[in-house]
Amino acid sequence: MPSSATTIAAPDAARSASPPAPRVSVVVPTLNEETTLATLLRPLREHASGLDVEIIVSDGGSTDGTLAIALSLADRVVVHDAAHRQTIAAGRNAGAHEALAEAGDVLLFLNADIGLPEDLPLFIREVTAAARTHGAATCRVIVDPQEARPMERVVLGACNALYWGINTLRIVGMGRGEVHAVRRDVFEAVGGYREHLAAGEDFDLFKRVLRHPGARVAFLWRHIVHESPRRYRQRGLFRTMGAWALNATWVALGDRSRSTEWEVVR
């Protein structure tokens, strides 16, 4: 478990001195996400008590207004306090470490720059129910249709179809890191995310989940989250896809990512 993270807050969002432990822990890794984080956390905060969830933000050392937003909307905030740059895998594990101290049975990892489905309660209920039943779950990820470019629609649509087929046939566990729901006991059994991976950690986790006895990855086609197109716009769609494919291949064949450090795009 991570040793270079500190819990710095139990903010005003907390319900009482000794609330019952929530059944679902939402873990959001962040690094300078002041422009996106509130959009993600506000609807989660609004529905948190009714959905029996807690919100944990795991920050990798933000220097903008991310922490202030997290402190106002999350239940707990964990901050990376070591000199080295934290991988997103380590950030997710740091948040999970906080969650695993409680009695929740599902960890729901969400990227800070996603847009959640309009029917958020249904999404949370169904993705966590699928994780409880199968061990892990994910869903489709696309760019918001109002801002998506034609090629983004085509390529991401094909990727979603590929991930659905691969998971349905149980060829290998696969799913974008934007949404990972994992049952607590499965997450602990496979050892969480591998922190030495600068990229491809999402593919690697689901690969190991599928190898765990009795577990599989459920792909919920009916549910969609919207990702930010910022990386496609700054780095190029095919360049980004190529980097993902190379890192996934290296992780699958050599247990390490091709990238030694994932480029931050904001």
Image (spheres, grey):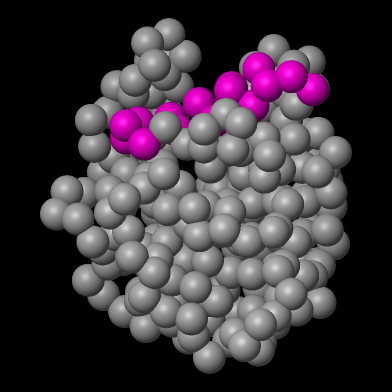
What residue occupies the far top of the structure in this picture? 253
Query: Residue placed at 48% from the left, 81% from the top?
Result: 10
| Image quarter (top left, top right, bottom left or bottom right) of the C terminus | bottom left
191 left or right of 257? Answer: right
Which region of the structure is painted magenta?
195-214
Q: What is the tally of numbered marks visible in this picture?
A: 0
- Taking depth in this image into account, of 262 and 229 the one nearest to the observer is 262
117 left or right of 208? Answer: right
Indicate the quadrant where residue 103 lies: bottom right
Answer whether residue 257 is visible to the viewer in this image.
Answer: yes
Query: Residue placed at 52% from the left, 52% from the top?
Result: 96
| Image quarter (top left, top right, bottom left or bottom right) of the N terminus | top left
Q: Is residue 89 magenta?
A: no
- Taking depth in this image into account, of 157 and 110 the one nearest to the observer is 110
From the top left corner, tell me how far across and down residue 186 is, in percent.
67, 35
Query: Residue placed at 57% from the left, 58% from the top?
Result: 101
